Amino acid sequence: MNVTIFPTGKGGSESAVRYLLSDTDHEGKKRSVMPEILFGDPDTFTGIANATKRAHKYTSGVIAFRDHETITPDHVTTLIETFRATFLPGLKVDENFADFWVMHREKGNMELHFLVANTELVSTLQLNIHPPGEKNIQFFNTFSTVMNHTFEFAQVVAHPLKFN
């Protein structure tokens, strides 16, 4: 499994929510398996994300699994809870932050898409689970490594000739 953060999050969050729940994929092809909402409410998330005047309203990403990696519902719950505890430490869902999780399975593998509003709900201060910088990228990579070890998946190894 691997975590990817997308370079989105500016403007209204409606388009991100619409894509996650759409019956078509990013290429406009009909999904063979409809998306499944795992956690969160799309309307609540959208309202919170769009309430800020900041340019970056939300963070969007995916936890993607290889075709042969078998994930149980308990694994999904554990993974999401561990993700929240790692990247939102000490914060409580729906009390301090709003997130929205959707499962996609139409490509033969499982993908857990997430949206996190970039606002802490009590203080209304900015909340950023993916600040810029190499250390943060290393942190996400380490999370993937630990979760792959936990679930006994093969580690993701960067291609030596591929540049970011």
Image: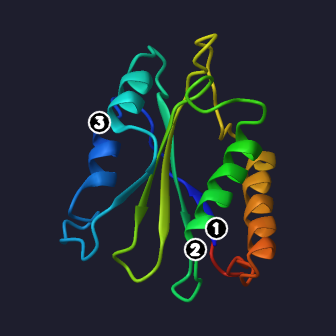
**Mark 1–mark 2 contact, CB under 8 Å?**
yes
Give 95 or 136, whichever is nearer the viewer.
Answer: 95
Residue ID for mark 1: 75
Q: Residue at point 59% right, 63% down?
A: 76
Residue lying furthest bottom in this view? 68
Instruction: Please state the horizontal and vertical placement of residue 35, each as a whole percent of the image.
Output: 32, 61
Q: Residue at point 34% right, 53% down?
A: 20
Of the residues under marks 3 and 1, which one precedes in the sequence?
Answer: 3
Front tag of 2 and 3? 2
Picture quarter with the N terminus: bottom right
Front tag of 3 and 1? 1
Q: Residues within 10 Å of mark 2 (few under 14, many from 20)?
A: few
Residue lying furthest top in this view? 123
Element carrying mark 2: loop
Q: How many marks?
A: 3
Picture quarter with the C terminus: bottom right
Give 58 or 151, whichever is nearer the viewer.
Answer: 151
